[in-house]
Image (cartoon, helix red, strand yellow):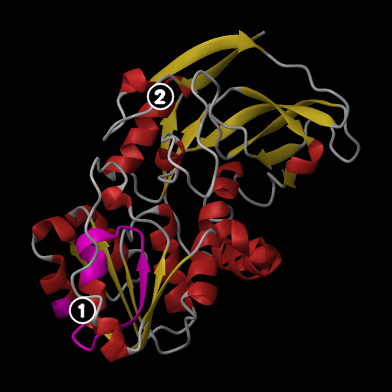
Amino acid sequence: MINREWHLQSRPVGWPKPEDFALVEAEVPTPGEGQVLVRNKYLSVDPYMRGRMSAAKSYVAPFELGKVMQGGAVGEVVESNAEGIAAGDHVLHFFGWREYAVVDAKNAVKVDAAAAPLSTYLGVLGMTGLTAYAGLLRTASFKEGDSVFVSGAAGAVGSQVGQIAKLKGASRVIGSAGSDEKVKLLVEEYGFDAAFNYKNGSVAEQLRAAAPDGVDVYFDNVGGDHLEAAIGQLNRDGRIAVCGMISVYNSTEPVPGPKNLARLIQTRGRIEGFLVGDHYDLQPQFVAEVGPWVASGQLKYDETVVEGIENNVEAFLGVLRGDNTGKMIVKL
C-alpha cells in the first residue's frame, strides 16, 4: 500500500510557491504498541501553518525540510494496537498532510460521526471553533451589550466570533471581508449588523461609518490597517484580542505597527494576543454550549471543500489569498 504525503522542500521567502513542496510516495506505516493506523478522510489547512514553514523561532517548532508536514486531520481507524480505540472508530489527530498516519492513542480523540459531519471536528466544533470561543469570551472578556468588530469575518474563526457575540447579546457586530459576496453572507446569513469590503476603500473610514458609536471589542485576524482602524474606534476600556495577522505573514521585511497606539492611553484599552493551545480547559464548556447552537441551526457555518490530497498545497495557498468562505477543508 502506498501512502502519499506532502513534504516541505524549501522554506518560502514571501509568498509560498508550489515548488516549495513535494508530494512524496511512501509505504503505509505499521502501528506499534499503543498506536493506531488512521486513514485520513479530511485534512485541515490553516493560516498559522505559514509560520511553521519558516525557520524563525516561534511558539511551535518549524516544519522540517524533507519531512512530512503536520496539521489537523480526522479519519477512520483501520488498525489498532491500543485499548479503547477499535478499527472503524473515527478519530481527530494532528498528523495531516498525508493519506495514512500512525498516531499514539493518547494523541487521538474519538469523535462521533453520527452526531455531526466529520469535517466539523476540524472547524466549527474543532480547533477553529474553540479559537473563536476562547478568544472572544476569555481573552477579549466579552460581555453582554458590547459592540464587536471582527476582521477576516467570513473565515472559519471570524464567522463564528460574530455569531457567538450575537447569541450572547452583543449590541452590534461589524465584520470586514474581502469581497461583496462575503459581505452579503455576513449580514444575510450570519446575522452581522454591518459589514464592509476592505478592498473598497479605507478600512478606517468604513469602520467609522459602520460603528459610529465605536467598538468595545476587536477580534483581530488580519493586523495592519485593520488593527490601526480598530484602535481608532476603540471605546473606553476597549479590548483587542489578537488571534492572527494574516496581512503580514508573507512579508519579507519587518512591518511597522499601528501609528495610533498612544490612543490606548486615552481609552484605557488593552491588546492581548492568545493561542488556542492555552485554552483547552474550555473544550467541555465550548462543546456543551456551541454544539446545541450548531445542531439547532442557530450558529451557521460554511466549509470550502477541496477534493484530493494532490490539491492540498493549492488549498493552503487559497487560505492565504482569502479564497475560502468558512473553514477550508481537503477531502480525501
Residue 114 placed where, x, y %?
69, 47
Alpha carbon separation for disc pair 1 and 2 = 41 Å
Residue under label 2, please give it.
Answer: 311
Rendered view: 25 above or below 35: above
Residue 316 occupies quadrant:
top left
- For image coordinates 75% across by 45% down, the residue present is 110
Quadrant holding the N terminus? top right
Residue type for callout 1: Gly
Rendered image quadrant of residue 223: bottom left
What residue is rendered at 35% in x and 28% in y? 314
At mark 2, the secondary structure is helix
Quadrant in the rendering for residue 92: top right
Local SS, label 1: helix
Per the rendered image, the range of residues in magenta is 208-228
Q: Is residue 87 visible?
A: no
Which of label 1 and label 2 is nearer to you? 1
> In screen coordinates, is 169 left or right of 332?
left
**Camera-nearest residue between 197 and 263:** 263
Location of mark 1 (residue): 232
Q: Which class describes the residues within 10 Å of circle 1: few (<14), some (14-19), or many (20+)?
A: many
Graded by Cα atoms within 10 Å as few (under 14), some (14 to 19) or many (20 or more), the crowding at tag 2 reads: some
- Residue sticking out furthest to the right: 83
Tell me the kind of residue under disc 2.
Asn
Q: Left or right? Give the position of 304 relative to 81.
A: left
Residue 45 forms part of the magenta stretch: no
Question: x, y percentage for residue 52?
Answer: 46, 38
